[in-house]
Amino acid sequence: MNLFIKHFFLLVFLPKIIFSQTIVEKEHLSFCKTISMPIRGEIKKSDSHSGCISKSGGHTFTGQGQIGKFKIIGEPYSLVEVIFSDGDFTGSGRSIIFETGVPLRVSLDGKGEHNFSIGASAVINANQKPGMYSGSYSVGYKYSKLKQQWKYHTGYAEIEITPTPMTIYEQAPMFFSDVVNGNSGGTIKLNHNGILENVSGNAKFVGGSGSPAIFSLTGSSNTEVHISFTEGKLRGTGSTIRLHSLSHNLGQSPVISQNGTLNIKVGGQLKLNPNQKSGMYSGRYSINVDY
């Protein structure tokens, strides 16, 4: 009996398994702290260096900010396309439009990973209200050589707008005019409109009306400020005269104007000593203005 043995070979073709890619945001994009300016301008946070630059408008910055950092995980040695959407920051003032990075094509390493960073540009409105602003944007990604739908990841970004540095200077000093003091002394008051009056005592005002101090302030427009004073002393030919009860003409909640300026008139009171010696007296006091 003859025995025939036949060998059969079955070939099975399996499709290559491709790892699904994913993306992880490692660091949020953060612009440098940007000082509000009276003109519109564009700033840039580069993806390749620290700090920010002003492309227009002359904005200045503090701090370094933070570039946006991402990691793609997928098929080793594969090519992945990456795209970005624009976004806008919302916060205490008008929205700020920002544009993120340009499209990328990246190659994953042997571990199936690739790290990359992005920067962005932002358009800062004129007199942008100070405060913290935050926003989001989309990062799209897919394999380059496969027919695949785009996948999207949400990235986050922020920017802090800081007030325009405040400056203040004295346009005119406080002047109490010429005063004849009574023997018992007393207190005289200089009002914001220049009118002098006795709070106590019987001093005579022989030099006409006085004049309040006038200060000019510049800062962030439409921003409320708080004004306070530190009293002073006048020195001259006789005993020191106390300058106190200083006040301004702008009420409890003064606001810097749209053009970023504020004019302040300041009056106060003098405590005259009994038999105050005649002569010229002068001194200093402090005006304190805070946002």
Image: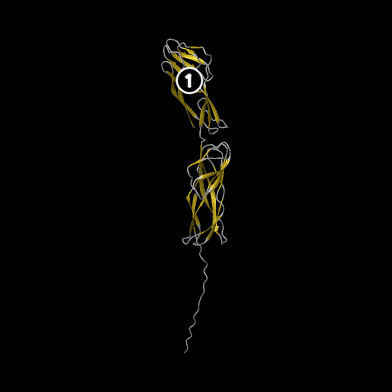
Residue 23 rendering spot, x and y as whole percentages: 50, 54
- Residue 284, image quadrant: top left
Residue found 48% across the figure and 22% down from its top = 247
- Assess disc 1: are there few (<14), some (14-19) or many (≥20) residues with their C-alpha within 10 Å of its C-alpha: many
Asked which colour scheme the image uses, the reply is secondary structure
**Disc 1 element:** strand
Which kind of residue does numbered mark 1 sit on?
A: Gly
Residue 167 vs residue 238, the one in the foreground: 238
Q: Nearer the viewer, residue 182 or 252?
A: 182
Spot the residue most to the top: 183
- In this orientation, which residue lies closer to the viewer: 10 or 183? 183
Please tell me which residue is depicted at 48% across the width and 20% down the height of the picture.
Answer: 268
Residue 257's place in the image compared with 40, above or below, is above
Q: Which of 86 and 171 is in front in this view?
A: 171
Pointer 1 residue: 268
Q: How many marks?
A: 1
List the single residue furthest toward the bottom: 1
Q: Where is residue 158 in the image (x, y as percent from the top left)?
A: 51, 44
State the residue at coordinates (47%, 22%). Answer: 246
Q: Please state the horizontal and vertical placement of residue 31, each as a whole percent of the image.
A: 51, 44
Point out residue 64 in the picture as x, y percentages from the top left corner.
48, 44
Position of residue 204 relative to residue 284, above or below, is: above
